[in-house]
């Protein structure tokens, strides 16, 4: 394997301003990226979570579109034991981890990757070798892709860490960005390493890049790419062998590329299976379901009106209903437009037939509601011709909209997000799962609200028809949402959008 140990520090792609006073709620006021000041806080106020502007440093320009696929390693022996790994190199893949890596290989088998970067740690390198298969090109190992350095924590079982380090371990759990151990701030250091990685990855002459690494470093790679600070640690989940995809698009003026998160944490297993979010159990969840494909073959903004689903859309809705069958959905909230209402009805019918389908022993009742604020089509109708001709299949297409349109979209979707959180607040049920069905553009805006981002970030996310995105609330609806996955489509089977290929031709891309 080739080793890549040293490279210049990454020049990050956007400058943004993040909160300096408190952790929750936090506010993002603009969409530019920054470098954080890497120094120890000197006052009690400074010790609060903060991201400060050090220098406005854009990503280097790129000549051609580049797609980067991030994969976390499969389950390791220390994952299985509940032991804190950090950047230690003692654990190996379990049999389950090897199987997860093989499933990821099958998911990515049709892609002609130009290059593979990997962490040098055994568990990651072995995952990369399984996915890379018989390709002739060597895997490039890069020490900056190693897992977060956790110093004295490494090797301890979690209960041992709690007993030995007490307050420090508690801070690691609740305020990781300000967590200090052995004179280090691990999360801040990690964000710096992630920026450094992007310089090396983007400098490589390739269009399709595979990166195999770890949970925390993959979180940092996603966050730094789209301009998010250390307070987003543990907000964008990375499961074992979860796949995330980032599109880098050349800027028309030759500057820093446009960057779009095409997919987050597409896992070998079900994204809605019971489990923890960032290590914590949750009883409150919102599932964003994108309506099925419509009869609009052009997929332009001007055709966002009230349309029926086509046959592919019906299949997508049925596949989504099947995926959700193992969950007891409390409420389905839908946009009133035809395609969304059709999708919601199909999901409801399958839920209420759970006993007949063998998924439950008693019939279920699912409450159905319409929210007009989820229907955003009318916002786009007064737009200019240049705007209405934009295809919403393009990654980052929302970057091309007028400011008045994106502001109206954010305002309307904010009201819808408030309605969803209100629905989730109902304490009459011990477990509350709310499914929201709408056009992909409405859900992109909702994801922005979940992350407390302004409209400048809308172009940083992409969703496909029939996809689902999952948000967990381990602290209840008044706490921060944890993004379990974005744009998950594996449940669509043969009708899914390929993970590693753009939905449009390279020229258009």
Image (cartoon, rainbow, N blue to C red):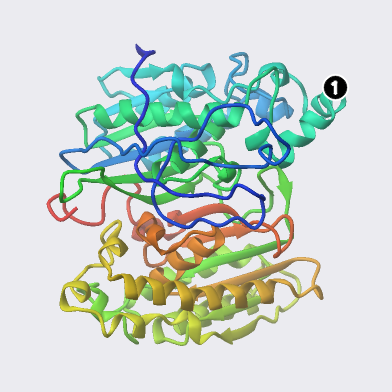
Nearer to the camera, 240 or 52: 52
Residue 437: x and y in percent read: 50, 75
The residue furthest left is 507
Query: In percent of the image, x 37 and y 67: which residue is there?
Result: 465
Instruction: Tell me if mark 1 has few (under 14), some (14-19) or many (20+) residues whose alpha carbon lies within 10 angstroms of its own.
Output: few
Nearer to the camera, 403 or 56: 56
Question: Based on the displayed image, in which of its 4 quarters is residue 149 positioned?
Answer: top right
Q: What element carries label 1?
A: helix
Residue 107: x and y in percent read: 39, 42
The residue furthest right is 163
Q: Is residue 117 above or below residue 494?
A: above
Nearer to the camera, 121 or 257: 257
Query: In percent of the image, x 21 and y 69: which residue is there?
Result: 390
Question: Based on the displayed image, in which of its 4 quarters is residue 209 positioned?
Answer: top left
Residue at which label 1 appears = 164
* Residue 91 appears left or right of 217: right
Residue 173: x and y in percent read: 73, 38
The quadrant the N terminus occupies is top left
Residue 219: x and y in percent read: 51, 39
């Amino acid at each position: 394997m080739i080793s890549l140990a040293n490279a210049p520090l990454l020049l990050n792609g956007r400058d943004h301003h993040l909160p300096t006073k408190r952790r929750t709620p936090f506010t993002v006021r603009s969409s530019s990226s920054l470098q954080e000041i890497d120094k120890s806080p000197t006052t009690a106020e400074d010790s609060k979570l903060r991201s400060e502007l050090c220098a406005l440093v854009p990503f280097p320009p790129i000549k051609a579109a580049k797609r980067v696929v991030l994969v976390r390693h499969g389950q390791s022996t220390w994952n299985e034991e509940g032991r804190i790994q950090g950047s230690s190199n003692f654990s190996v893949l379990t049999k389950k981890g090897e199987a997860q890596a093989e499933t990821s290989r099958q998911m990515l088998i049709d892609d002609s990757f130009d290059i593979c970067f990997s962490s040098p740690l055994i568990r990651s390198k072995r995952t990369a070798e399984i996915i890379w298969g018989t390709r002739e090109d060597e895997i490039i190992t890069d020490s900056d892709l190693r897992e977060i350095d956790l110093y004295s924590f490494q090797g301890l079982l979690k209960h041992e860490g709690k007993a030995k380090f007490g307050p420090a371990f508690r801070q690691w759990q609740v305020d990781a960005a300000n967590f200090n151990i052995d004179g280090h701030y691990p999360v801040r250091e990690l964000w710096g390493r992630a920026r450094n990685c992007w310089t090396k990855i983007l400098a490589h002459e390739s269009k399709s890049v595979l990166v195999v690494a770890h949970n925390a470093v993959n979180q940092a790679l996603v966050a730094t790419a789209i301009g998010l600070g250390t307070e987003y640690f543990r907000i964008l989940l990375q499961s074992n062998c979860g796949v995330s995809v980032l599109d880098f698009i050349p800027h028309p003026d030759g500057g820093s590329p446009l960057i779009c998160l095409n997919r987050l944490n597409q896992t070998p297993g079900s994204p809605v299976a019971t489990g923890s979010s960032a290590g914590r159990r949750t009883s409150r969840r919102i599932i964003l379901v994108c309506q099925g494909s419509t009869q609009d073959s052009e997929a332009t903004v001007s055709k966002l009106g009230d349309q029926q689903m086509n046959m592919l859309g019906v299949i997508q809705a049925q596949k989504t209903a099947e995926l959700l069958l193992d969950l007891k959905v409390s409420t389905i909230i839908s946009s009133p437009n035809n395609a969304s209402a059709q999708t919601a009805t199909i999901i409801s019918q399958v839920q209420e037939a759970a006993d007949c389908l063998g998924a439950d022993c008693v019939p279920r009742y699912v409450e159905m509601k319409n929210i007009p604020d989820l229907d955003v089509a009318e916002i786009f109708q007064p737009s200019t011709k240049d705007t209405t001709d934009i295809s919403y299949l393009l990654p980052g297409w929302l970057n091309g909209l007028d400011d008045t349109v994106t502001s109206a979209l954010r305002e309307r979707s904010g009201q819808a997000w408030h309605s969803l959180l209100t629905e989730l607040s109902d304490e009459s049920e011990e477990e509350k799962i709310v499914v929201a069905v709408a056009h992909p553009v409405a859900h992109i805006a909702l994801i922005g609200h979940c992350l407390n981002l302004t409209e400048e970030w809308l172009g940083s996310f992409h969703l496909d028809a029939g996809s689902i995105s999952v948000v967990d609330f381990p602290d209840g609806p008044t706490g921060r949402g944890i993004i379990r996955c974005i744009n998950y489509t594996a449940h669509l089977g043969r009708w899914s959008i390929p993970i590693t290929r753009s939905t449009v031709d390279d020229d258009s891309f």
